[in-house]
Image: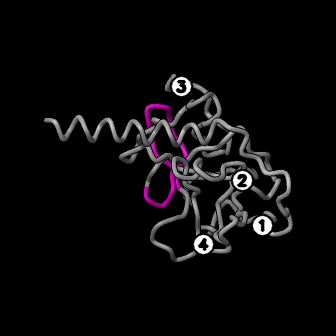
Amino acid sequence: MHSRITMAAAAAALAIVALAGCSSNAASTGSSASSGASSSSSSHSDTASSTPDLGTAKTSLGTVVVDGKGMTVYVFDKDTANSGTSACTGACLSAWPPVTTTSSTPAVAGVTGKVGTITTPDGKKQLTLNGLPLYTYSGDAAKGDVTGQGLQGIWWVVSPSGDKVTGGSSGY
């Protein structure tokens, strides 16, 4: 029992530290937009991939976008659509990992918004939907979890059309 309490306390401390990193103004003023230029792809792909990079799933908030592992996808209010960069940097990325792909034409299933990619500072391809970078939340433990919804009033799950879903806030 003592180890469960210790693990819960450690998890809570990690979440607080990670969220603190997200609450600061993480937008960089000197980033080079040319290296993070957005590339567009069709919202539907005819690749032979068995698992799409993005799909949809039913959750307590309705049908939302999920990554290739079935985890809920989020957008960040501090990001600017079509800027080619992400405002989530540093500690923020520990709590909100970017949704990435290795494909120049990401495979999608059920997503109707415009899918594209931007280049992360470490050279990976982060998926975008309607020009906004996509993230998962480290606090979501299983498929269908939406525990990041409404966190700090700036993190939102995404509908298949690419609109943020603002209902169902977690209240944190």
Q: Residue at x 51, y 47 (%)?
A: 95
Q: Nearer the viewer, mark 4 or mark 3?
A: 3
Label 4: few (<14), some or many (≥20) within 10 Å? few
Helix, strand or loop under label 2: loop
Q: Earlier in the sequence, mark 3 or mark 1?
A: 1
Q: Earlier in the sequence, mark 2 or mark 1?
A: 1
Q: At numbered mark 3, what does the secondary structure look like: helix, strand or loop?
A: loop
Q: Are marks 1 and 4 in contact (CB under 8 Å)?
A: no
State which quarter of the image contains the N terminus: top left
On screen, residue 77 versus residue 91, left or right, reads: right
The answer for how far apart the CA atoms under marks 4 and 2 are is 28 Å
Bounds of the magenta segment? 55-69
Vertical comparison of 171 with 60: above or below: above
Identify residue type, mark 3.
Ser
Q: Are marks 4 and 3 in contact (CB under 8 Å)?
A: no
Q: Nearer the viewer, mark 3 or mark 2?
A: 2
CA gap between label 3 and label 2 equals: 23 Å
Which numbered disc, 4 or 3, marks the residue that appears first in the sequence?
Answer: 4
Q: Which secondary structure class fits the magenta region best? A: strand
Provide the residue designation for mark 2: 86
Q: CA distance from mark 1 to mark 4?
A: 18 Å
Residue bearing mark 3: 169
Which of the two discs, 4 and 2, labels the residue nearer the N terminus? 4
Q: Are marks 2 and 1 in contact (CB under 8 Å)?
A: no
Name which of mark 1 and mark 4 comes first in the sequence: 1
- Looking at the picture, tell me which residue is in the foreground, 20 or 59: 20
Task: Please give the residue where the numbered disc 1 appears in the rendered image.
Answer: 39
Q: Nearer the viewer, mark 2 or mark 1?
A: 2
Frontmost of labels 3 and 1 is: 3
Residue drawn at x 85%, y 57% as measured from the top left = 30
Under mark 4, the amino acid is Asp
Residue 46 badge: 4
